[in-house]
Amino acid sequence: QVQLVESGGGSVQAGGSLRLSCVASGYISSTVSMGWFRQAPGKEREGVSYISRSGGVTYIPDSVKGRFTISRDNAKNTLYLQMNSLKPEDTAMYYCAARASLGYNEYDVIYANYNYWGQGTQVTVSS
C-alpha cells in the first residue's frame, strides 16, 4: 500500500522558515516524480514545486521562486520543501504527491495527474 506522510508544518512569523518533509512507503521512491501542492480555504489547489524521479530536474513557479526549494533523498524515500522568507499568503495546507509513469528527468505540473497524496501538513504564517 502506497503511503505518503508529511511533517514539518507549523506556525511562524512572516520572514521565517520551515522545512517540510514527506516520507514515502509502499514503493521505491525513485520510480515516481513528486510535487508539493498547497490549498488555502476557499482557494484552488496550487502547485508550489515539482521534482523529477532523478531529483536533478525541478520546477518552481514564479509565485514562490527564490523562496522555496524542493529536493529529495531517494535512499531515504523522502521529499523535502525548504520554505524561506515566508509570507502570510503562504498560509495553507501543504500536500506532497507522487506521480508514476514519467521519465527519469520529467516532472508534471498538473495535480490531477498525481496518483498518490499525503494527508497534508498545515503551515500558518502570521504578519
Image (cartoon, helix red, strand yellow):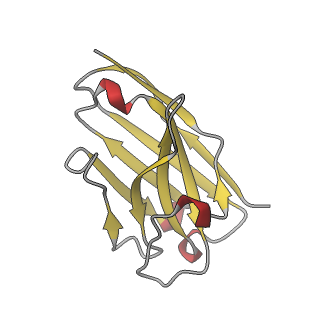
* Quarter of the rendering containing residue 70: bottom left
Q: Who's the residue at 53% across and 80% down the image?
A: 102
Left or right, 32 with reference to 88 = right
Instruction: Find the residue positioned furthest to the top.
Output: 127
Q: Is 25 or 41 nearer to us in this picture?
A: 41
Q: Is residue 80 above or below residue 27?
A: above
Left or right, 116 with reference to 95 = right
Could you tell me residue 117's position as x and y percent? 64, 53
* Quarter of the rendering containing residue 1: bottom right
Q: Is 17 or 123 nearer to us in this picture?
A: 123
Could you tell me residue 57's position as x and y percent? 34, 73
Could you tell me residue 107's position as x and y percent? 44, 72
Q: Who's the residue at 51% across and 42% down the image?
A: 44
Quarter in which the C terminus is drawn: top left
* Quarter of the rendering containing residue 86: top left
Q: Is residue 96 above or below residue 87?
A: below
